[in-house]
Amino acid sequence: MTEVIRKRKDRAKAWAGFTLVELLLVIGIMVLLLSVVVPSVSQVGDAYNLAKEGQAMNDRITLARQLAMSKNCDVELRFYASKTPEGMTTWSTQLWQFNSASGTYKEISAKSPVSHSIVVVDNDALSPLLSKLKSGANPDKASEVWNALRFRPNGRTAATLDNSNNFITLQLRRDEGNAKANYYTLQINQLSGQVKTYRP
Protein backbone atom coordinates (compact mmCIF):
# COMPACT_ATOMS: atom_id res chain seq x y z
CA MET A 1 0.00 0.00 0.00
CA THR A 2 2.77 2.44 0.90
CA GLU A 3 4.49 1.64 -2.42
CA VAL A 4 1.33 2.70 -4.33
CA ILE A 5 1.12 5.96 -2.36
CA ARG A 6 4.80 6.69 -3.02
CA LYS A 7 4.36 6.14 -6.78
CA ARG A 8 1.33 8.45 -6.84
CA LYS A 9 3.35 11.17 -5.04
CA ASP A 10 6.21 10.77 -7.53
CA ARG A 11 3.78 11.04 -10.46
CA ALA A 12 2.21 14.22 -8.95
CA LYS A 13 5.67 15.81 -8.58
CA ALA A 14 6.48 15.04 -12.21
CA TRP A 15 3.36 16.90 -13.42
CA ALA A 16 3.61 19.81 -10.94
CA GLY A 17 5.22 22.41 -13.27
CA PHE A 18 5.36 23.56 -16.89
CA THR A 19 8.09 22.38 -19.16
CA LEU A 20 10.17 24.99 -21.02
CA VAL A 21 8.44 24.11 -24.30
CA GLU A 22 4.99 24.64 -22.77
CA LEU A 23 6.04 27.99 -21.30
CA LEU A 24 7.47 29.19 -24.63
CA LEU A 25 4.31 28.07 -26.41
CA VAL A 26 2.10 30.10 -24.03
CA ILE A 27 4.33 33.20 -24.43
CA GLY A 28 4.23 32.82 -28.22
CA ILE A 29 0.42 32.68 -28.23
CA MET A 30 0.23 35.78 -26.01
CA VAL A 31 2.59 37.73 -28.33
CA LEU A 32 0.51 36.71 -31.34
CA LEU A 33 -2.73 37.85 -29.66
CA LEU A 34 -1.17 41.19 -28.63
CA SER A 35 0.05 41.84 -32.17
CA VAL A 36 -3.55 41.50 -33.36
CA VAL A 37 -5.23 43.45 -30.53
CA VAL A 38 -2.89 46.46 -30.07
CA PRO A 39 -3.42 48.03 -33.55
CA SER A 40 -7.20 47.73 -33.11
CA VAL A 41 -7.06 49.47 -29.73
CA SER A 42 -4.85 52.20 -31.22
CA GLN A 43 -7.32 52.80 -34.07
CA VAL A 44 -10.20 53.09 -31.60
CA GLY A 45 -8.19 55.66 -29.61
CA ASP A 46 -7.42 57.67 -32.77
CA ALA A 47 -11.09 57.62 -33.83
CA TYR A 48 -12.13 58.82 -30.37
CA ASN A 49 -9.55 61.65 -30.49
CA LEU A 50 -10.79 62.75 -33.93
CA ALA A 51 -14.42 62.72 -32.75
CA LYS A 52 -13.48 64.71 -29.63
CA GLU A 53 -11.62 67.39 -31.62
CA GLY A 54 -14.39 67.56 -34.22
CA GLN A 55 -17.00 68.09 -31.53
CA ALA A 56 -14.80 70.75 -29.89
CA MET A 57 -14.54 72.58 -33.25
CA ASN A 58 -18.31 72.34 -33.66
CA ASP A 59 -18.73 73.86 -30.19
CA ARG A 60 -16.36 76.75 -31.01
CA ILE A 61 -18.21 77.60 -34.22
CA THR A 62 -21.56 77.45 -32.41
CA LEU A 63 -20.21 79.64 -29.60
CA ALA A 64 -18.97 82.26 -32.08
CA ARG A 65 -22.43 82.42 -33.65
CA GLN A 66 -24.18 82.64 -30.28
CA LEU A 67 -21.86 85.40 -29.06
CA ALA A 68 -22.45 87.41 -32.22
CA MET A 69 -26.21 87.25 -31.65
CA SER A 70 -26.10 87.87 -27.89
CA LYS A 71 -23.58 90.75 -28.05
CA ASN A 72 -25.18 92.22 -31.22
CA CYS A 73 -21.81 92.56 -32.94
CA ASP A 74 -19.59 90.72 -35.38
CA VAL A 75 -17.60 87.85 -33.87
CA GLU A 76 -14.78 86.01 -35.64
CA LEU A 77 -13.52 82.51 -35.09
CA ARG A 78 -9.94 82.54 -36.34
CA PHE A 79 -8.27 79.33 -37.49
CA TYR A 80 -4.51 79.68 -36.87
CA ALA A 81 -2.00 77.58 -38.79
CA SER A 82 1.53 77.65 -37.36
CA LYS A 83 4.66 76.05 -38.76
CA THR A 84 6.94 74.33 -36.27
CA PRO A 85 10.75 74.38 -36.78
CA GLU A 86 10.40 70.79 -38.10
CA GLY A 87 7.99 72.03 -40.81
CA MET A 88 4.85 70.50 -39.28
CA THR A 89 1.64 72.58 -39.30
CA THR A 90 -0.23 72.86 -36.00
CA TRP A 91 -3.69 74.36 -35.60
CA SER A 92 -5.52 76.43 -33.00
CA THR A 93 -8.63 78.64 -32.84
CA GLN A 94 -9.50 81.89 -31.07
CA LEU A 95 -12.55 84.13 -30.78
CA TRP A 96 -12.37 87.86 -31.59
CA GLN A 97 -15.02 90.56 -31.25
CA PHE A 98 -15.24 93.35 -33.84
CA ASN A 99 -16.11 96.88 -32.67
CA SER A 100 -17.74 98.57 -35.66
CA ALA A 101 -17.58 102.04 -34.05
CA SER A 102 -13.79 102.02 -33.66
CA GLY A 103 -13.01 99.44 -36.36
CA THR A 104 -10.91 97.42 -33.89
CA TYR A 105 -10.80 93.80 -32.76
CA LYS A 106 -10.67 92.48 -29.21
CA GLU A 107 -9.75 88.96 -28.09
CA ILE A 108 -12.63 87.32 -26.26
CA SER A 109 -11.03 83.91 -25.68
CA ALA A 110 -7.63 82.33 -25.29
CA LYS A 111 -6.23 80.26 -28.14
CA SER A 112 -7.57 76.71 -28.14
CA PRO A 113 -5.03 74.32 -29.65
CA VAL A 114 -6.13 71.41 -31.80
CA SER A 115 -4.50 68.11 -30.83
CA HIS A 116 -1.15 67.51 -32.60
CA SER A 117 -2.49 64.22 -33.97
CA ILE A 118 -5.33 66.09 -35.76
CA VAL A 119 -5.10 68.49 -38.72
CA VAL A 120 -7.51 70.85 -40.38
CA VAL A 121 -7.20 69.70 -43.99
CA ASP A 122 -6.05 72.81 -45.83
CA ASN A 123 -7.06 72.11 -49.43
CA ASP A 124 -9.99 73.16 -51.60
CA ALA A 125 -11.27 69.62 -52.05
CA LEU A 126 -11.80 68.80 -48.36
CA SER A 127 -11.93 72.26 -46.71
CA PRO A 128 -13.05 74.83 -49.32
CA LEU A 129 -14.42 77.06 -46.54
CA LEU A 130 -10.90 78.18 -45.58
CA SER A 131 -10.25 79.76 -48.98
CA LYS A 132 -13.52 81.75 -48.73
CA LEU A 133 -12.58 83.37 -45.41
CA LYS A 134 -10.72 86.58 -44.67
CA SER A 135 -7.06 85.79 -44.00
CA GLY A 136 -4.14 87.47 -42.31
CA ALA A 137 -0.78 86.93 -40.67
CA ASN A 138 0.31 87.25 -37.06
CA PRO A 139 2.72 90.22 -36.84
CA ASP A 140 4.25 88.76 -33.65
CA LYS A 141 4.84 85.33 -35.15
CA ALA A 142 5.98 85.21 -38.77
CA SER A 143 5.26 81.48 -39.12
CA GLU A 144 1.57 81.88 -38.19
CA VAL A 145 -1.33 82.72 -40.54
CA TRP A 146 -5.06 82.74 -39.90
CA ASN A 147 -8.43 82.54 -41.62
CA ALA A 148 -11.43 84.14 -39.92
CA LEU A 149 -15.00 82.85 -39.97
CA ARG A 150 -17.08 85.92 -39.11
CA PHE A 151 -20.64 85.80 -37.81
CA ARG A 152 -23.04 88.74 -38.07
CA PRO A 153 -25.48 89.71 -35.25
CA ASN A 154 -28.26 87.91 -37.13
CA GLY A 155 -26.34 84.61 -36.86
CA ARG A 156 -25.35 84.43 -40.52
CA THR A 157 -21.79 84.27 -41.79
CA ALA A 158 -20.13 87.28 -43.42
CA ALA A 159 -18.64 85.05 -46.13
CA THR A 160 -20.74 84.25 -49.19
CA LEU A 161 -21.25 80.51 -48.93
CA ASP A 162 -23.03 77.86 -50.96
CA ASN A 163 -23.26 74.07 -50.77
CA SER A 164 -19.93 73.63 -52.56
CA ASN A 165 -17.74 75.77 -50.29
CA ASN A 166 -19.35 75.78 -46.83
CA PHE A 167 -17.48 72.93 -45.15
CA ILE A 168 -14.22 72.23 -43.35
CA THR A 169 -12.67 68.82 -42.64
CA LEU A 170 -10.52 67.45 -39.81
CA GLN A 171 -8.42 64.31 -40.20
CA LEU A 172 -5.80 62.34 -38.34
CA ARG A 173 -2.36 63.73 -39.19
CA ARG A 174 -1.21 60.35 -40.49
CA ASP A 175 -4.17 60.29 -42.95
CA GLU A 176 -3.68 63.85 -44.25
CA GLY A 177 -4.37 64.04 -47.97
CA ASN A 178 -6.20 60.70 -48.10
CA ALA A 179 -9.82 61.58 -48.95
CA LYS A 180 -11.03 58.04 -48.13
CA ALA A 181 -9.54 57.98 -44.61
CA ASN A 182 -11.40 58.66 -41.37
CA TYR A 183 -12.58 62.29 -41.21
CA TYR A 184 -14.83 64.75 -39.36
CA THR A 185 -16.52 67.32 -41.61
CA LEU A 186 -18.36 70.40 -40.37
CA GLN A 187 -20.80 72.08 -42.77
CA ILE A 188 -22.08 75.59 -42.05
CA ASN A 189 -25.56 76.48 -43.28
CA GLN A 190 -25.25 79.54 -45.49
CA LEU A 191 -28.60 80.98 -44.36
CA SER A 192 -28.75 80.23 -40.63
CA GLY A 193 -25.07 79.82 -39.72
CA GLN A 194 -25.81 76.55 -37.93
CA VAL A 195 -23.42 73.59 -38.12
CA LYS A 196 -23.98 70.02 -39.30
CA THR A 197 -21.37 67.31 -38.85
CA TYR A 198 -20.55 64.30 -41.02
CA ARG A 199 -18.54 61.18 -40.18
CA PRO A 200 -17.93 58.07 -42.30
Image (cartoon, helix red, strand yellow):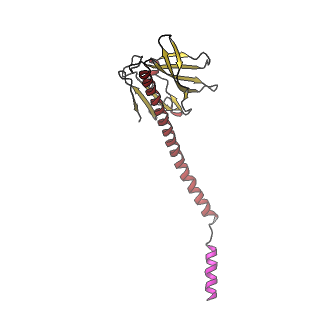
Q: Is residue 12 above or below residue 39?
A: below
Residue 74 magenta: no
Magenta stretch, residue numbers: 1-14
Residue 97 locus on image (x, y percent): 49, 19
Q: Specify the quadrant that holds the N terminus.
A: bottom right
Which is nearer the eye, 101 or 52? 101
Query: Residue 181, position in %: x, y?
Result: 46, 34
| Front-lying residue, 89 or 193 | 193
The residue sitting at 54% across, 23% down in the picture is 80
Q: Quadrant of the C terminus?
A: top left
Specify whether 182 is left or right of 8. Answer: left
For the image shown, how many numbered marks are present on the structure? 0
**Residue extending furthest toward the top:** 102
**Percent position of residue 9, x then y:** 63, 79
Q: Is residue 5 magenta?
A: yes
User: Horizontal placement of 168 versus 9: left or right?
Assistant: left
Residue at image position (64%, 87%) is 3
Query: Is most of the magenta stretch helix, strand or loop?
Result: helix
Residue 98's spot in the image, x, y percent?
A: 49, 16
Q: Where is 168 relative to 2, above or below?
A: above
Quadrant position of residue 185: top left
Q: Is residue 125 above or below residue 7?
A: above
Q: Residue at x 64, y 75 (%)?
A: 13
